[in-house]
Amino acid sequence: MKLLQLSFLTVGFLVLGLCHQDAKLKDFLYAWNGTCIQIPCFYDGIRRLDDFILYHNPQYNDRNSTFYGTILFVKSNPHENKRTKLLTSKRGEDCSVLINPVQVSDSGILGLRLTTMVPQDRWMTYVHLNVTESAPQPHIQLPQQLKEFQKVTVTCSLNYSCSDYPVSLQWFLDGQKVPLGQVENPLSVGAQRVLTESKFTFSLNWTHHDKQLACQLWHTDQQRLSEKAVRLDVKHTPKITIEASPHLEVKEGESVILKCLVQSSNPTIKGNFFWFKNGESVQNWGEILTLPHVNWEQTADYRCEAENEMGLGRSESVHLQVLYSPKFSKVVPVDLSVTENKTVELSCVTVAYPTPTNYAWFQDEKKIEGEKEQNLRFQEVNRQQTGQYTCMAENSEGWGEVSERARLDVQYPPTGVTLTIKSQTPIREGDSVILSCSYEQSNPPVHKYLWGPQFSQKGRPYSDVLTIQSIPWNAESVTCWACNTECSQATPVNLDVQYAPRDVKIILVTPESDIRSGDQVRLQCEFSSSHPRNVHYSWTQNGKHFQDGKYLNWSSISPEDSALYSCFVTNSIGQTQSPEWDLKVQYAPRHLQVSIVPSDVVMEKTSVVLTCEADANPAIDLYTWFDWKGQKIDNYGQKLTLWPVMTHQSGAYWCQGTNKLGTGESRPATLTVYYSPETIGKRTALGFGVCLALLLLALLGFQSVRCWQKIRGEQDFQERPRTQGSFFIRNKKMRRPHSAAAPQSLGYYNPAVEERINYATLQFPDRALVPRYLETSPVSLQTEDQSVIYSVVQKPQGGDYENVMPQSPPEEEGLHYSELIHFGEGERPPMQEGVEYVTLRH
């Protein structure tokens, strides 16, 4: 059903595709005499275009419904096409045509007649062709308005494109050719567009105004065909400059005229001109600014502004410089404090134009001979150069006034700085130490003291007294600095702190690595430092005094010597203990024994864990278990788990433990496993069951003899069919007579109760019926002989089946027979077949 639906959908889409047929052409095409023309044509919805005819000025004949006219191209007969050919492309829906060369007489209407056979269809498409004598001018497209600082793209285009007659467009701005890197030349040829185009992108400025922009049409790069030029009308703000008369550098008292000149403005300026001095407006609205009798304060930057519809135009600033003698002289810095022997430089600053060329310096109103530079420099200033300083400056306009006073203060750091220990000596670790710092002279006075290295200082910070609350054992040399603007250091003092021994530790001298039982061992007590150096050594074992001396020696060490040892180093200041050193003696496994959990006497089918316990260093890395037979047990752990344990696993077990130094062996441990009550009960029941089985076999043999005698007295079975093929069941069933004494029941009953016999016969129909009932493949049964096996089943007395009446009296016995006829081809052998009987009695 789904396949049928898909078929209908496929047919539907094909019909829709065939109904949509369209050929796309441009309405108008342009060319000039001697060139070529490409007529782009593309169609949709057509599987295959069978014929294609290009007419010049076609006419339609209503009588026979055909077109006539000058035929320029026929697809079915390409040899007659002299100036035309069909353009091929990768696209399958291309019907484009090339005319080369094209003539003025080709102007007119061109008709493209397309024909398809499957499905049968025809249609005509028209295009207007205009061929001129010479190449037309290209068309330049500009934005509607051009403004300065605007980035614009101008387009030059020509409605023409033909690969057999290549043309290009080139740009010229103000007579200069535009580089190719600034030009984009896209070529557009399509079903609705045939165009040669070039785009020029540039940023406008006011200098482009009234410049000529030209686009030229070229055939290759050697022949110019036509040109189109336009004038750029760039709107911009006024561009103005300032002209000074007589010039921009005058002496005080002279006059100056500044004029605002307009270089360009599009559109023209409207309104007044505006003047500015150092950015501030000047009350003058005319094109000319007159400055009579200028003074030094009129030295400034001047600019003018004008406005049109595009905005405000500003001129570049011009600097008017007035010449005058030095004024407002001063010495900088005005107040200078400097350290003795430092480099000092004083400068004479003044207002003057031109720059002064000569200077004079005074100390405490006394001229300093030989100093004529603007800067007064002291390479290494000393205390005698402290005082009041003034200066004068001279330029081409004369000497200026004497400057204001400046103060120079020459300072020097503290001298004679010393450090003194105020507390008693010698100094011990942890003592409180008091130090004092002092000096002889200082300018300016000392205002703080610094100490080194850094300590926790008691009292005022930066004080001349330092108190060290708890002096460390490794205190460095102490020094101090007395500071004003600079700091002077005292000679460092060594505090010579006495302390107890430090970094006490135990070193193993021999052996170099692991200590094993029987080795000769020597331990040494060491320390890093002690002040005073004279010390005493002592040892402890597990916290109790052991012996004195620097060394501990064992000629033959034993495992019992393993303990925690410490050494003590004592001097007159104190005593220092080393970290405890764990002396571990390595030895082979010893004292091995086997422990049994929960007990060495357990009941079967429970869990028993045997653990091999031992004393060894290093720890035992391999355990081996053995049973009472001396056989190795496949268990290499410290614990041997027996679960569930059985009685046959009773016996003696022992273990071995091995480390890298040797192997130790335990004494045997005996495990006793006894029977559970459940096992005892099962064994008793088994004996009783064997006796009962023997009794039942005797009874079964007696019953089998009796049954055989009865079967031999039965009548022969009904005739067996000799045909072979498919089978059916024929079952003779007899309804049991109703009995008034017995309850009523439906269905069939077992006739064997009343000495009747049911037969089941397996027969096969005639071979002629085989194709109707059987598969064509034969059935073959492999049998050793032609014997027949009968099976007799006595109905159970405790149930009912579909065709069995309520149970018959127990004294009645019934027989059921089943006969299987040999599945062979041909006639059965005439020999008498043997019969075997099997009776199952309840």
Image (cartoon, rainbow, N blue to C red):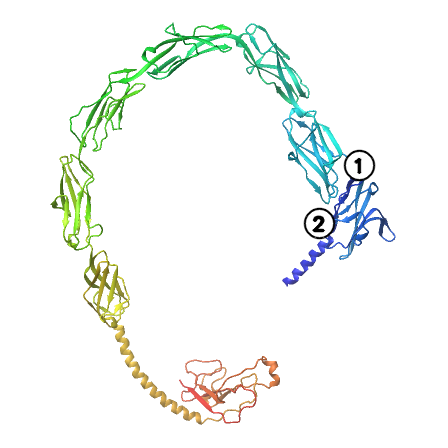
Query: Which quadrant holds the C terminus?
Result: bottom left
Classify 678 as above or below 234: below
The residue type indicated by label 1 comes to Ser
Classify 791 as above or below 410: below
- Answer with mark 1 or mark 2, whichever residue precedes in sequence: 2
- How many numbered marks appear? 2
For the question of whether residue 294 can be seen, the reply is: yes
How many neighbours does mark 1 have within 10 angstroms: few (below 14), some (14-19), or many (20 or more)?
A: some
Per the image, the residue denoted by label 2 is 89
59 sits to left or right of 589? right
Q: Position of residue 648 (x, y in %)?
A: 25, 73
Picture residue at 88% right of the left edge, 52% below the top: 63
Q: Position of residue 517 (x, y in %)?
A: 17, 55
- In this rendering, which labeled residue sits more in front, label 1 or label 2? 1
Per the image, the residue denoted by label 1 is 134
Q: Position of residue 303 (x, y in %)?
A: 59, 16
The residue type indicated by label 2 comes to Ser
